[in-house]
Image (spheres, helix red, strand yellow):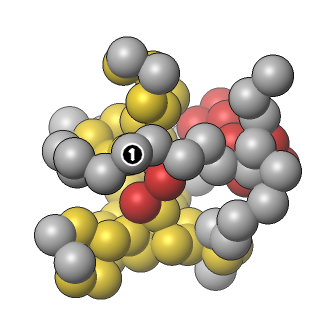
Amino acid sequence: MSDKTYTPIPCQLYDQLEIMSMHKTDCKITYTAEGHTKKIEGKIVDLFPISSVEYLKLDSGKTLRLDLLLSINEIEFKEGKDCSV
């Protein structure tokens, strides 16, 4: 996991993740890890918080922090209005 301060993702992107999870969509995910861009494929099976940090879990068991996502199925994760109240 990352030591970087968590930055919530935009609400619209979180909504897209929920839809992909509900529909068991095959996802091509690009994310950052240890300063490198990485790619992985799988289905999102869960979205959950741990200590105010949001994660997704893939059907492979891999867990990713949402603020480290760069894109999923060509949807780019850019900064925008987050979902925090």
**Residue 84 screen position, x and y as percent:** 74, 29
Look at the picture and state if 78 lies above or below 84: below
Q: Quadrant of the N terminus?
A: top left
Residue 59 in sight from this viewpoint: yes
Look at the picture and state if 52 lies above or below 44: above
Residue identifier under label 1: 5
Q: Is residue 34 left or right of residue 8?
A: left
**Residue 51 screen position, x and y as percent:** 37, 17
Look at the picture and state if 49 lies above or below 26: above
Kindly indicate the quadrant of the structure image that contains residue 68: bottom left
Q: Secondary structure at mark 1?
A: loop
Residue drawn where x is 47% and y is 32% of the image: 54
Give the total number of marks visible in the rendering: 1
Residue drawn where x is 16% and y is 70% of the image: 34
Nearest the eye: 28 or 49: 49
Look at the picture and state if 46 lies above or below 27: above
Q: Is residue 82 left or right of residue 60?
A: right
Classify mark 1: residues with Cα within 10 Å, few (<14), some (14-19) or many (20+). Answer: few
Q: Quadrant of the C terminus?
A: top right
Residue 23 in sight from this viewpoint: no
Q: Is residue 47 left or right of residue 64?
A: right
Residue drawn where x is 20% and y is 37% of the image: 61
Q: Is residue 8 left or right of residue 69?
A: right
Nearest the eye: 59 or 1: 1
Q: Amino acid at mark 1?
A: Thr
Residue farthest to the front?
5
**Residue 56 screen position, x and y as percent:** 42, 38
Kindly indicate the quadrant of the structure image that contains residue 53: top left
